Amino acid sequence: MTYCCGILVRDGIVLVADTRTNAGLDNIATFRKLHIFEKPGERVLLLATSGNLSVTQGVVNFLSEGFENPDTGEVENAMTASTLLQAAQLVGRAVRRARMEAFNSAEQSAGVSFDVSLLLGGQIAGGAPRLFMIYTAGNCIECTPDTNYLQIGEHKYGKPILDRAVNFDTDIYDALKIGLISMDSTIRSNLSVGLPIDIALLRRDAFQLEVSTRIDSSDEYFRDLRERWSKALRAAHMAIPAPPYRGRAP
């Protein structure tokens, strides 16, 4: 299982992704799910992946190495798209091709799910920062200022945090903080999501990443954030008056 979230604010884009791929008492593995395609001064594309690893890895390979567009005959990759929408459409074609190849492999007989979902965010010179979600079928939706975040994977535990705390005018570092709180809430509630966490922050019109790092269990800020958030929640519920319903019966 996975949890990744992307947040679009006026100042840019934040992506947060966990790295856990299997979970159990003695079966935990990690795999990078946040991939970066960057040409400083021209473009930064951030791709977060969820779902079948053979398909998502195939998508990343296609975006890196390129593949032929059947309509034009041209070889396309993450560096050839002229807009974020074209890049999202390219990812959709890569998903369809990677799934087709996976279906034709031996895995087909093993009852493996080939479903995937991906987040693509970034900025290409000449356009604004944009954030898309790409589905298994290769179609996509775009994030908007009205609903300025997207999630993939185990999203239900982190969604209430984002719903209440973030909007398009949120400061970009506050958006990163809220994304990390959303991730912590998911980690606490679901064993299949866990550290380390990959994070990326792209400021509008910078065309290079301002933050790109991995957070593990030794990260002092993340440990402090988790502790402060837990204390704040306890203090908040203690400050709310007790329900006045004692003794009432239907």
Image (cartoon, rainbow, N blue to C red):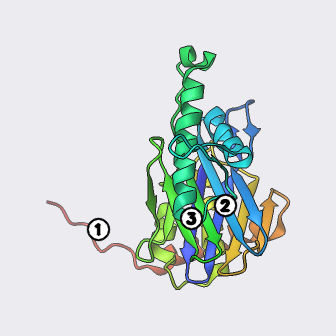
Query: Camera-side residue: 98 or 170?
Result: 98
Residue wearing tag 1: 246
Q: Is residue 75 visible?
A: yes
Q: Secondary structure at mark 1?
A: loop
Query: Camera-side residue: 38 or 1?
Result: 38
Q: Counting other residues with Cα less than 10 Å from the Cα at mark 2, is it few (<14), some (14-19), or many (20 or more)? A: many
Residue wearing tag 3: 84
Considering every residue shown, the one lying at the far right of the view is 218
Q: Secondary structure at mark 3?
A: helix
Residue 67: name its quadrant.
top right
- Give amino acid for label 2: Leu
Could you tell whether 77 is left or right of 190 in the image? right
Residue 237 lies, with reference to residue 54, above or below; the image says below
Q: x, y percentage for residue 223? A: 77, 65
- Give amino acid for label 1: Arg
Considering every residue shown, the one lying at the far left of the view is 250
Q: Earlier in the sequence, mark 2 or mark 1?
A: 2
In the picture, the quarter occupied by the N terminus is: top right
Q: Rounded to the nearest whole Å, what is the CA distance between mark 3 and mark 1?
A: 57 Å
User: Any mark on residue 46, and which?
Assistant: 2
Q: Counting other residues with Cα less than 10 Å from the Cα at mark 3, is it few (<14), some (14-19), or many (20 or more)? A: many
Q: Earlier in the sequence, mark 3 or mark 1?
A: 3
Q: Residue at x 51, y 36 (%)?
A: 115
Query: Camera-side residue: 48 or 71?
Result: 71
Q: x, y percentage for residue 86? A: 54, 59
